[in-house]
């Protein structure tokens, strides 16, 4: 009897599978981030909700928000069905609300010309030749380039580990 109980316990614990969250979408204007994990019918998912919060807070911070909090609850959606219609794979999604005001955070330099115009400096008469004005656009600052690269990375559907690896490369960490 003991052997049978141990065997059942071993079989049940073998089904527990650690699952990582990944970002699935969101809206900067609405301040909403969606994170999810996937599992199949043979797995009992073991998740770390702190990881979901960390991803959501990171995405919100890239958009200029200060923090994130879950809306509450989660949505489980069938991703694949077997021959008789029963579900064999699911995705569990949690929606986070970004917190803070975008108006309180400085906006990155806009290279498309949408920045409010600044007053031109007064001209001083000088015998020195005027500097040559080139029509070429000015190079991006390091921070603006990093921000652009992170925005592009956010648009890709990569795993959490891959996102973190590439984020560290972009930020030079």
Image (spheres, rainbow, N blue to C red):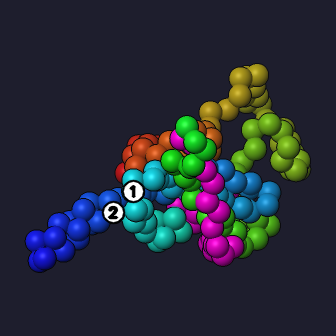
Q: Which mark is residue 124?
A: none
* Chain part drawn in magenta: 55-82
Q: Residue at x 50, y 42 (%)?
A: 158
Q: Is residue 120 above or below residue 69?
A: above
Please give left or right for residue 17 compared with residue 39 in the image. left
Left or right, residue 60 beside residue 160: right
Q: Nearer the viewer, residue 147 or 136?
A: 147
Label 1: which secondary element: loop
- Which residue is at a point 51% across and 65% down the rendered structure image? 52
| Circle 1 Cα neighbour tier, 10 Å, few/some/many (<14 / 14–19 / ≥20) | some
Front residue of this view, candidates 120 and 154: 154
Which badge, 2 or 1, comes first in the chain's sequence? 2
Residue 22 at least partly seen: no
Query: Tag on residue 43?
Result: 1
Give x and y (percent) for residue 39.
Answer: 46, 53
Tell me whether the residue at label 2 lies in contact with that at label 1, contact meaning CB atoms closer than 8 angstroms.
yes
Q: Residue 93: x percent and y percent?
A: 60, 59
* Quadrant occupied by the N terminus: bottom left
Q: Which residue is mark 2?
A: 16
**Where in the figure is residue 122, as x and y percent of width and height?**
87, 47
Q: Is residue 70 magenta?
A: yes
Q: Quadrant of residue 105?
A: bottom right
Q: Nearer the viewer, residue 138 or 122?
A: 138
Q: Is residue 138 above or below residue 81?
A: above
């Amino acid at each position: 009897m003991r052997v049978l109980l141990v065997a059942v316990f071993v079989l049940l614990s073998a089904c527990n599978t650690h699952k990582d969250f990944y970002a699935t979408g969101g809206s900067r204007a609405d301040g909403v981030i969606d994170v999810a994990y996937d599992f199949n019918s043979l797995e009992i998912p073991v998740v770390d909700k702190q990881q979901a919060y960390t991803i959501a807070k990171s995405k919100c911070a890239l958009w200029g928000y200060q923090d994130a909090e879950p809306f509450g609850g989660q949505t489980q959606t069938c991703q694949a069905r077997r021959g008789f219609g029963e579900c064999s794979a699911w995705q569990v999604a949690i929606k986070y609300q970004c917190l803070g005001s975008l108006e309180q955070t400085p906006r990155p330099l806009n290279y498309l010309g949408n920045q409010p115009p600044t007053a031109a400096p007064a001209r001083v008469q000088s015998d020195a030749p005027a500097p040559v004005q080139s029509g070429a656009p000015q190079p991006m600052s390091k921070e603006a380039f990093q921000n652009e690269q992170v925005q592009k990375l956010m648009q890709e559907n990569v795993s959490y580990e891959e996102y973190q690896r590439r984020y560290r490369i972009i930020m030079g960490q």
